[in-house]
Amino acid sequence: MTQQTLEQLETPALLLDEAQMQRNIERMRSRLRRLGVGFRPHVKTNKSIEVSRRLMESPEGPITASTLLEADYFAQHGVRDILYAVCIAPNKLQHVMKLQDQGVRMSLILDNMETARILADGARGSGRSFEVLIEIDSDGHRSGVRPEAPELLEIARFLHGNGVTLKGVMTHAGASYDCKAPAEITAMAEQERAGAVRAAERLRAAGLPCPVVSVGSTPTALFAEQLAGVTEVRAGVFVFFDLVMAGLDVCRTDEIALSVLATVIGHQREKGWTLLDAGWMAMSRDRGTAGQRVDQGYGLVCDLDGRPLEDFILVGANQEHGIMARRSGAAGPLPAVGTQVRILPNHACSTAAQFRQYEVLGPEHSVTATWPRFSGW
Amino acid sequence: MTQQTLEQLETPALLLDEAQMQRNIERMRSRLRRLGVGFRPHVKTNKSIEVSRRLMESPEGPITASTLLEADYFAQHGVRDILYAVCIAPNKLQHVMKLQDQGVRMSLILDNMETARILADGARGSGRSFEVLIEIDSDGHRSGVRPEAPELLEIARFLHGNGVTLKGVMTHAGASYDCKAPAEITAMAEQERAGAVRAAERLRAAGLPCPVVSVGSTPTALFAEQLAGVTEVRAGVFVFFDLVMAGLDVCRTDEIALSVLATVIGHQREKGWTLLDAGWMAMSRDRGTAGQRVDQGYGLVCDLDGRPLEDFILVGANQEHGIMARRSGAAGPLPAVGTQVRILPNHACSTAAQFRQYEVLGPEHSVTATWPRFSGW
């Protein structure tokens, strides 16, 4: 393949700085080594075998997936240990069985007796076993049973007595995204750990198996002081990072490996506007920094070397148009038509999902490869 | 293909009610017939040949596209008259030429002298001609030159004298999405028409060609009282409609042809939450109704027959989880695990973009076909 440069790409395009990604991966790896826990990377952010290959401990996994399409895709690429980390719905059981038939060790999660009964019926009806983790609610932000809830033992006993393999407990402290400072994240990491470990202790005290204690989010994984009792960590967004993570001081903006390449296509000079060919279809509608100390609009605009144009902000976005203005309202020259910029995303998962491929950035504006990715279910 | 029913689909899935879509198309067609103008449907909402085939006046078009990937795809399906309705960027000219080489009549737009010079250079350098419409800013919401601006004639004269075919003017009153009532939309439609026609008159008075006067948005197309001087209308979202359009009284909620099928996967009963397997990855992060009279959260939840569960609202969304609660805060039974619901989207363009295919709904919960769609650039 002829090597391209940034300047030759059609815009918008999704850029991935490979060297920076590798540093982000190393940071997570060394952190988890120090904490003495296993790693089950979440592939929902990258949805690419090229990226995930660099994350996984072996070509067979393990990984965490957010959709069964991810499970299908990674199974086709040889992954054999997949946790589907959304409470299993009845209409997905057939699909899970197909993955099992391909030799994939699928782990499922659930947090309620209704689903436990459906799964037990499915196991009985199909004559097969399912491996299940019970989801624990360690922070009140979404799903899961509370670590002290009576239902925890009720669900576990029912599963264990009805042909379902009780693999353990898992939790995700999504509330860590709303922390205001690293000290709060460290406290949230301890809350996440303690909740999962407490649930595991209750199961074991009741004579039930609980080999796996799985926790994780990018912030808590990077700021946990200790993970005693935890067997594995899940995290995904760290591979790219994004402005929400930077707003939490989980990373610096110059550690964000993902950006959208866009081109200036016009101006409304009396308003101080510069129009770009990247709108919300490219950036996504995610405005995750809106509630943070610094609202980054639809993304932080940088030059081609990734240096922020500090005074500019993407104040608006139509489907294929981005509207860039000055934060300060100051006058001054605007970038000429044809100028390319790189825009750091609020949320790597949602921006990456808008694109079909990564353009892999090497040294000096070189584009060294194109890595496909997918979306959907 | 075996015919499926809604109940057999894996969720989340994107449902398209074909009969309702057909009624929406008929409404637009009869409206434009009465107004006596041509139709150049915008394919950016549907990105599907199956849907667009039902919109187009002939298998060869014309259509309006928002990306060159749309142009490629529809060209492969036989469309031969494509307006690329985003100001052309220098790095897209080679791609446009490839489309021309395939026999596609490509129309481009621009709104500034810098782009005009780039295009003239491109025409000269490649020995070919480009057809161009000048974009007019009729409402101050985005790009375009004002109808009375001196630059309008400057750009037109330059193009006409430098080997570029001046095809006319175009405008899009995107501000119609912010109107509060149909009377305001009617006024906006007249402003859009008057702006484009005034620009065309100025060109003609200067002895310049202006055969095409192109306007449009779904609200203004449906509420214009007259379109004297306009030759063609562009609109796209009307084919599906959405909650933003319903909030503007452009349609009723029962005219929305697009919905996301989701399944109840759990509850947090003490909070009154029902958890669904459709989060922002399925619905998109678009919160277009947040500023309207009724904030619909991440979407209006309906039963399988499309009847709204009026008291429920999707108050939150994680990547693959939707959190449904009662607007009133009232107590009462929550739908059981496994229950399917249909969620009407805030914005059809952004929700549809999250999916790879439409599940086509026929009578009595039947799924009569699967129509692929695409995203990206």
Image (cartoon, coloured by chain):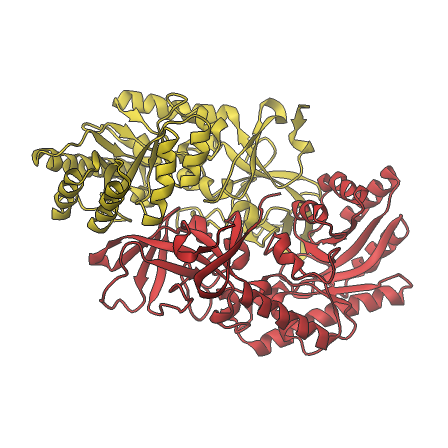
Chain colours: A red, B yellow
* Vertical position of residue B166 compared to residue B286: above or below: above
Quadrant position of residue B24: top left
Q: Residue at x 80, y 63 (%)?
A: A212
**Does residue A211 appear in the picture of this structure?**
yes
**Does residue B250 appear in the picture of this structure?**
no
Residue B167 picture location, percent across and down: 22, 33
Residue B125 picture location, percent across and down: 26, 43
Residue A265 picture location, percent across and down: 30, 51
Q: Left of A80 or right of it: where is B299?
A: left
Quadrant position of residue A120: top right
Q: Quadrant of the C terminus of chain B?
A: top left
Residue B170 or A20: which is nearer the viewer? A20
Total residue callouts: 0
Q: Residue at x 14, y 47 (%)?
A: B149
Residue A130 or B89: which is nearer the viewer? B89
Q: Residue at x 8, y 36 (%)?
A: B206
* Vertical position of residue A177 compared to residue A117: above or below: below
Q: Left of A33 or right of it: where is A164?
A: right
Q: Left of B189 or right of it: where is B281?
A: right
Residue A316 picture location, percent across and down: 36, 55
Residue B151 or B124: which is nearer the viewer? B124
Q: Left of B217 or right of it: where is A191?
A: right
Q: Quadrant of the N terminus of chain B?
A: top right
Quadrant position of residue B148: top left
